[in-house]
Image: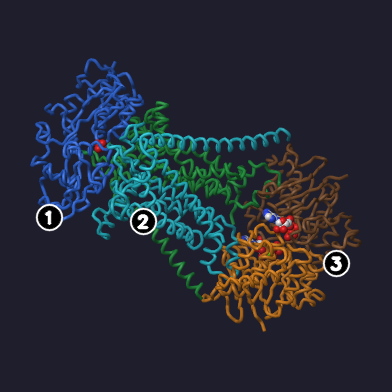
Chain colours: A orange, B brown, C cyan, D blue, E green
Amino acid sequence: MDKIVVSNLDLFYGDQQALKTISLAMAEKSVTALIGPSGCGKSTFLRSLNRMQDLIPNVKILGQVRIDGQDIYADDTDVVLLRKRVGMVFQNPNPFPKSVFENVAYGPRIHGEADKKRLNEIVETSLHGAALWNEVKDRLHKSALGLSGGQQQRLCIARLLAVEPEILLMDEPTSALDPISTMKIEELIAELKNKYTIIIVTHNMYQASRVSDRTAFFLNGELIEEDVTSNLFTRPAMKKTEDYISGRFG
Amino acid sequence: MDKIVVSNLDLFYGDQQALKTISLAMAEKSVTALIGPSGCGKSTFLRSLNRMQDLIPNVKILGQVRIDGQDIYADDTDVVLLRKRVGMVFQNPNPFPKSVFENVAYGPRIHGEADKKRLNEIVETSLHGAALWNEVKDRLHKSALGLSGGQQQRLCIARLLAVEPEILLMDEPTSALDPISTMKIEELIAELKNKYTIIIVTHNMYQASRVSDRTAFFLNGELIEEDVTSNLFTRPAMKKTEDYISGRFG
Amino acid sequence: MHHRKAWVYFNDRLSRYLFISSAVLVSLIILCIIWFVGMQGFSTFRQVSVIDFFTSSKWSPDSGQFGALTFIAGSIGTTLMAIVIGGPLGLAGAVFLAEIAPPWMRAIMRPATDLFAGIPSVVYGYVGLTVIVGFIRKSTNSSTGYGVLAAGIVLAIMILPTVISLSEDALRSLPGTYNEASLALGATRWQTIHRVLVPAALPGILTAIILAMARAIGETMAVQMVIGNSPRLLSSLVSPTSTLTSNIVMEMGNTPFGSTWNNALFLMSFILLIIALVLIILVRTAVRKGAVR
Amino acid sequence: GCGQTAAPTTPTPSATTIDKKTISAAGSTALQPLVKIAADDFMAKNPGVQVNLSGGGSFTGLNNVASGSVDIGNSDVFVTDELKDKGLVDHQVAVAPFLIIVNKDVTLDNITKAQLSDIFTGKITNWKDVGGKDAKISIIGRAKSSGSRATIVKIVMDGKDFTDAAAAQDSTGNLITGVAQTPGSIGYIDAAYLKDTVKALKYNGVAFSADTVGNGQYPIYALEHMYTKGAATGTVKALLDYITSPEFQDKNVEKSGFVAINKLKK
Amino acid sequence: MKARHTDRFASIMLWLGALVIVGLLVAFLALILVRGLPYLNPDFFNGPDGVRGQLFNSFYLLALSLAFSLPVGLGAGIYLAEYAPKNKLTDLIRLSTESLATVPSIVFGLFGMIIFVNKLGLGFTILGGSATLALLNLPILVRVTEESLRAVPRSYREASLALGATMWQTLRKVILPTALPGLITGITLVAGRALGETAILIFTAGMNVSRIPFDVNPLAAGETLAVHLFAAKSNPLPGTNADQIADGTAALLIIMVIVFNLFLTIPSRWLQYRLLGKNRE
Ligand SMILES: Nc1ncnc2c1ncn2[C@@H]1O[C@H](COP(=O)(O)OP(=O)(O)OP(=O)(O)O)[C@@H](O)[C@H]1O
Ligand SMILES: Nc1ncnc2c1ncn2[C@@H]1O[C@H](COP(=O)(O)OP(=O)(O)OP(=O)(O)O)[C@@H](O)[C@H]1O
Ligand SMILES: [Mg+2]
Ligand SMILES: [Mg+2]
Ligand SMILES: O=P([O-])([O-])[O-]
């Protein structure tokens, strides 16, 4: 069943068009990878799925994005609820200037969890989930800004897991991670797939082929091709895709 | 000839030790890769080579770092000159809130280049060098903050190339880049190696083996092993290194 | 090239020395003023007992009685009043401007707050005297309407621009990623504001509140017009009393420099400084304790 | 000399010459309006001369003239003991009478010394006790350091102190505003400042006028002084001479609500 | 759902707060302008009791006081934000700067009077007045400067220094331009205070104006509009239209502040544009 259906999505920054009539459907409990050269619009596309793009001035969006059949750009959409359901990990780690614990507890707290014990549990589980627990268990109450780049990124993933969204948008979640953390995150994705719908931007084609069911290739704001991952990497339909995959591009 | 010689370097954040008695020499016109799990101290090590760590309060540094035989932590070190000679690309892209052009022209300008024509040339060459020219040539005078993550990172590389340092410190320079830009940067590194001494932090072992002459493996603030890259990856001397490389770690 | 480099370094060094000497100069000036006020003030104690000065509310310089309790209580009272009213209102204004206001509203309100800052205190005092005092008299059934309430309201309005502009700047200079990160977790705008943005901007907001408080406790002309200036210990919010500043300005000009009376007024300025110091430290620790966790 | 600058109609006193181009006066705010008029006239008559004027209060004026930083110190009060030996010379330039004013809703027209004293000391707090309607009395006075207040204390209250319940204003203008808007209020001002927003009371049945002050029937007044350090000379003397000249005293002093100094019977 | 209601409620409260603030301001402006504007005719400026001297003095004093306090205040703020080691001494400086901001201006006035009027024997002058004003404004300038600089992200600093820029170059080309809006806020606050200050100036700059129109001699007497207004309110001279003078002056002061703010914002926009490059999004 299709969880997310995007139809004819156009997006403009001022008068520069960043997404050109994108149509794409993403199935429930599946992983979709977005690949493409830097600046082709992957982040932009991702951010328009939970209306993060609303925050940038001068952005114009045309077309439709339906989640569970509901147009998220309809006037009566509850954006807050939307964003709780559609969680996001950003390209650059962005922890709050709070303690490690408070960063992870933030989501549950705002959604009404006040019980100390439950919070402790959630924080621990989420940090385990993001493969960070061992490194921070002794400094839970120190500032998150003192973590290394990769630690910060995993913290952001833990923070997201703590709110248990239905859809996970991940913008290069492992680009700052070492292979071992990366592997753990990939394992996590494989596990989460059973419950969540996941869309992941990655520059690493091995990663795309390891974790995703389907892959979409973007170029210059256009969706060139979308297919089952193994097909796309072995028998791409389009010349441009082939060029990109084989590194013969540009 | 050894360009950089680090001996018995200890570094503390407050009372937490982040680097433990590191000794390491890096030869001129060579590429050294630093690998290791997230949080092991790679960035910290890199930042202590151009005294960027001076900017963080409560950091204590013991031991010696010699560049061309000169102790850079000596009292009479010219830190400004040091940093011009030892350029750095940061883990997270950090362009100035200025136009693309002004970002790249910044370095040459502060080092005295005022000639408009020369500046234009430098900016163009540097942007070419960082594989960014084509994407930004029409928006040179728009804000750099409107670039995509990968574009920002390449801009920072271009900005660095424009000052022509002797040593390049690169903290995961390609983690936000797509394979094609990555390839270009790797080619660039291969080319620059003829003139510069390069130290690169990377999580990508393929990258390490592709670009570097020697590789150093860090773990928990310690330097576990350092060797010719092909040796380290194929015949590591230490068990820990082997575990990490084969992904059997942790 | 070498020549230029020397020049760049010279500039760098020169600017550093200039900054250091500015800091030294400012420190010296501060020291001078504090020393001057302190010296002048402390010579009061040659004639007056320390205990009397702080514990008595009998201010009758002609008969040698210098009890400043009334003024101390008045100053603390009005300042707290001003902060209690003006602090939250100003902070609300700042949050509104930084996070909520549509552009057109911001375009009106931001310059408007700057204007507030430019209105002379005499005008505030006059509006207080003719509008607010009358209003209080009628609505509280006090006989004159002068008092801490009137002064507090006038001061609350006067400190608005300080609180608003400085807090708004602090909020605006936060990286956009905090906002994004919180909203992406499904936080409402208000949750984002009070759990992430305001705590993150706290140092700037604190500075705003402290400078506002400083302005409130040190404000003279406007307070003096609406406080009533009777040397009677604060007993109700709507009966005339005095503050340190109002009494200083009422009596400073007409008392001979060097006389005990005049010295006592300087001592009162010094006390003002001490009260401010204590309040500043209190605000800092209180807000830090309360919000960062 | 001043020959070429003196206006032909002005009989310039022979002993004075214009020496300094800029002179300054500071002090009493009560006297300031009068000095300001004099200074303006004087500058008009002597182009090139600048008279700098400031308020600050009587003692500020006395201090400044004693320390030599201004040429003239204006004061409502005689020089204080502390400054007695500084060689200050007194020039009395006007008489400042004081009025008792009340809010317009007060029905009284006259008040006696005893009643007033009882009100100000806080013994009487309701208008009905002095023949008015049943309403609370609010006193709005001046600060402890005020010359006006000192005069009232001395002449009306025989040295007794004001009640603590009295509110105070720093300046006559604000006092008038206060009395005008507060029902049942009473205060005192320099006669010069009377406005029709408040009502002036007769004192012991006598209304204030230049004549009643002159003949001693209206006793609430104070002398206004302009002090110099040592005998006045040059421009300073010329200015003081101008202020005390019959021409200025006749034309301006009474118009400004003061009483000419020579009207006073010693 | 509770969060949603709280959000709605908070939004309404914030809007209300904003409306109260704007309402207050509109009320103030209306009160002042409606009363005063009718009197603002040429005679009000050039007539016998005209205020053109006061008007000029207001700006002149403001300019001089900024000229004294800006370099030092900015310099000290920059030092505290960028150079100063973090220790007890700098904390002490910070603390005393803040508490100095509480000293009532009249004490500054007396301090200024003793220094400039008495000790240096200047008498009541524009120079003494503006120097004293500068003292009053220093603490605020220092604090605001430090705060604005601290708000600039560290990554800018790092990026610039890593390119081999000196601290001064980094400051001039990256940090100060980025902090400019905050600095402007500080200057506006300070300037507003300078334009509206009375207590200080009565004791240092005097209460009348030079007879020469637009006298730039810093040793001339310097009554400003605010002092003029104060004088008209507290000692309403008989025979003059004191109320009209006061109301007109108040209106003029407000207009002046508006003009000044414009003066400050337009060049500062331009300056930031210049310093940060053509930064159109
Ligand atoms: N400013 C700081 N204050 C305190 N601790 C810090 C600070 N910066 C780094 N650390 C700690 O020092 C250790 C090394 O950090 P560093 O940033 O060097 O790691 P790294 O190897 O670069 O990791 P990554 O690959 O995730 O970037 C980590 O445990 C980190 O949490
Ligand atoms: N805020 C913005 N204002 C203007 N242009 C923008 C903005 N954000 C992105 N763009 C432009 O839109 C295009 C798509 O950007 P986007 O960030 O989606 O790329 P991306 O595919 O995520 O690249 P990367 O892999 O480098 O992160 C780019 O050309 C970028 O410069
Ligand atoms: Mg992106
Ligand atoms: Mg790192
Ligand atoms: O201002 P006074 O005349 O009352 O001193």
Q: Amino acid at mark 2?
A: Val
Q: As rendered, which of D179 and C237 lies closer to the eye?
A: C237
Q: Chain of mark 2?
A: E
Q: Quadrant of the N terminus of chain A?
A: bottom right
Q: Closer to us: mark 1 or mark 2?
A: 1
Q: Is residue C247 left or right of residue A84?
A: left
Residue under numbered circle 2 = E26
Q: Position of residue B139 (x, y in %)?
A: 65, 56
Q: Position of residue C114 (x, y in %)?
A: 44, 51
Q: Residues within 10 Å of mark 3 (few under 14, many from 20)?
A: few
Q: Is residue C3 above or below residue E233?
A: above
Residue under numbered circle 3 = B246
Q: Position of residue B192 (x, y in %)?
A: 82, 50
Residue under numbered circle 1 = D133
Q: As rendered, which of C152 and B103 lies closer to the eye?
A: C152
What's the CA distance linking mark 3 and mark 2? 72 Å
Q: Residues within 10 Å of mark 2 (few under 14, many from 20)?
A: few
Q: Position of residue B11 (x, y in %)?
A: 74, 50
Q: Element under label 1? A: loop
